[in-house]
Image (cartoon, grey):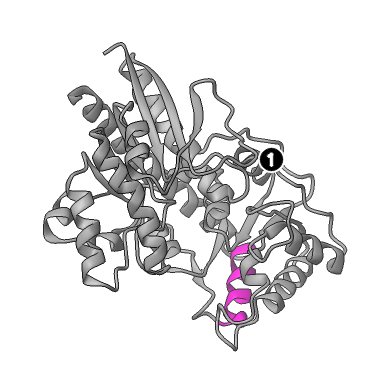
Amino acid sequence: MNKIKIGFVGHSYSRGNFGLCALAFGEQAVVERACTDLELDYEITCFETGINHPCNDSPKVKLETYDLRNVFKSAKQFSKCDLIFDITGGDSFSDIYGVKLFFVNYFIKMAVMLSGAKYISAPQTYGPYYRWWIKQLSNFYLSKSKGIYGRDEMSSNSLNKNNQKRIKCVADLGFALPFTQQAKFDKPTVGFNVNGLLYNSDNLLGKNNSYKELCDNIINKVKQLGYDIVLIPHVLGEERIADNDYFASVELAKKHGLTEPPFFQSPKEVKSYISKCHFFIGSRMHATIGAVSCGIPTLPLAYSRKFKGVYNSIQYPHTLDLKSNTQDEILLKLEDMLTIHLQQTTEDVNKALQVVKQKTDGYKKDIENVIKSL
C-alpha cells in the first residue's frame, strides 16, 4: 500500500462548535503521526452533511458532503476509504438526546457498515442508553469495528460484555489539537469561558442555580483577587442563538467593563489564545481541555457526566459540577486554586498531561497496527 485513504465521519471542520472541530484536528494529528511513523502517504476525507465556514488548513484533508437521507449513496461514497474513523460528535452515541437524533447518527453508521470499509470507533462517550433495543443496535455496530475507544471509564458500563472486553479508554482527542504557544499576558490573567447555552437558559441547571449570577460572581471574585480576566468563547457564530458563547461573552464584557472577546476563526486560534493565560475556568469541556493541554491550571465547571469521565480518566482532580456544587463552593474552590494551591494545581496539570501522552501514544500505536493489517 503506497497511500492510504482515510475517512472521518461524525467529525467536523466547519466553524461554530469548536469542541467538535477540536476532535477533528486532534484525530488528524494522531493519524498523521501514525502514517508518518509507518512512512506511508495518506489523504483524509471528512464527510459532513454541510460545510459552514471550513477551518481545515491541510492540503491532505478535503471535505465532502453526503446525503444523510440516502444510506446507499452515502455507503458508496464511504466505500472509497481504506479505513474510517467514526466519532459520533464525541458524545452523541446515546439516546440521551432522544430517539430521533440517535437514528440520525445510526443512519451514518449503517452507511459505514454497508460501505465495506474497515472502521474504528474513535475516542468518544458511549451511552447512557435508556432503551434496551438502542443499546443492542449500538453494540452490534461496535462489534463490527476494528477497535473501540472511549474517553472515560464509565462508557464501558454502557456496553455488552463482549464489547467491554474490547474497549480501551484513551485521552480525549481535543488534547492532541495543535496550537502555537503565545507569550503570556503581562499581568496575571484568568481566561473565562462562558457557556452560551447555560447563560441563555433558565432551568438547565435547576431552579436554584443561576448560571448568569454565577458568571457575575466569578468575574467579581477574580477581580477581587487581583487578576485580570479575559472572556474566551468556544462556540461562535454570526447568529445570536442560545448556544452561542460569543454574544453572552460580549454582554458580560460590557456589563463588567472588560475587553470585548475576540471572534475566533478556528479551534487552533482559540487554543493559542488560551495559552496566554495564567489560569482558566470554563463550562465548555473542550475549552477547558484546551487550557489543560497548554499546561494551564484549570477549573472545569461541568454540566454533564462527560466532564467527570474525561478528567477522571487522566487523573485530573479539579472538576466541579454546576448541578450539585453550590455557588459558594465554586467560588471558594476558585479562590483556593488561585491563591493557596496554584502551584499544586500546576503540578496536577503536568501529571495529567503525562497520562494524556501515554494514552494518546497507545491509540496511535493501535492505529498503526490496524493500518498494517489492512
Quadrant where the N terminus sits is: top left
Q: Is residue 50 left or right of residue 186?
A: left
**Residue placed under numbered mark 1 in the picture:** 265
Nearer the observer, 123 or 257? 123
Mark 1, secondary structure of its residue: loop
Which residue is painted at 27% across and 35% down in the image?
Answer: 115
Nearer the observer, 30 or 93? 93
Q: Is residue 199 above or below residue 325?
A: above
Give the extent of the magenta segment.
326-339
Residue 28 place in picture, x, y as percent: 45, 32
Quadrant where the C terminus sits is: top left
Residue 109 place in picture, x, y as percent: 31, 47
Q: Is residue 168 visible?
A: yes
Which residue is painted at 26% across and 65% down in the image?
Answer: 134
Residue 364 place in picture, x, y as percent: 32, 33
Residue 283 in magenta stretch: no
Q: Amino acid at mark 1?
A: Gln
Are there few (<14), some (14-19), or many (20+) residues within 10 Å of tag 1?
A: some
Which residue is painted at 74% across and 64% down in the image?
Answer: 248
Q: Is residue 361 left or right of residue 293?
A: left
Q: Is residue 157 visible?
A: no
Decide whether the magenta segment is chiefly helix, strand or loop: helix
Which residue is painted at 58% across and 48% down in the image?
Answer: 18
Q: Is residue 11 left or right of residue 208?
A: left
Q: Is residue 261 above or below residue 333?
A: above
Residue 332 in magenta stretch: yes
Residue 139 place in picture, x, y as percent: 20, 56
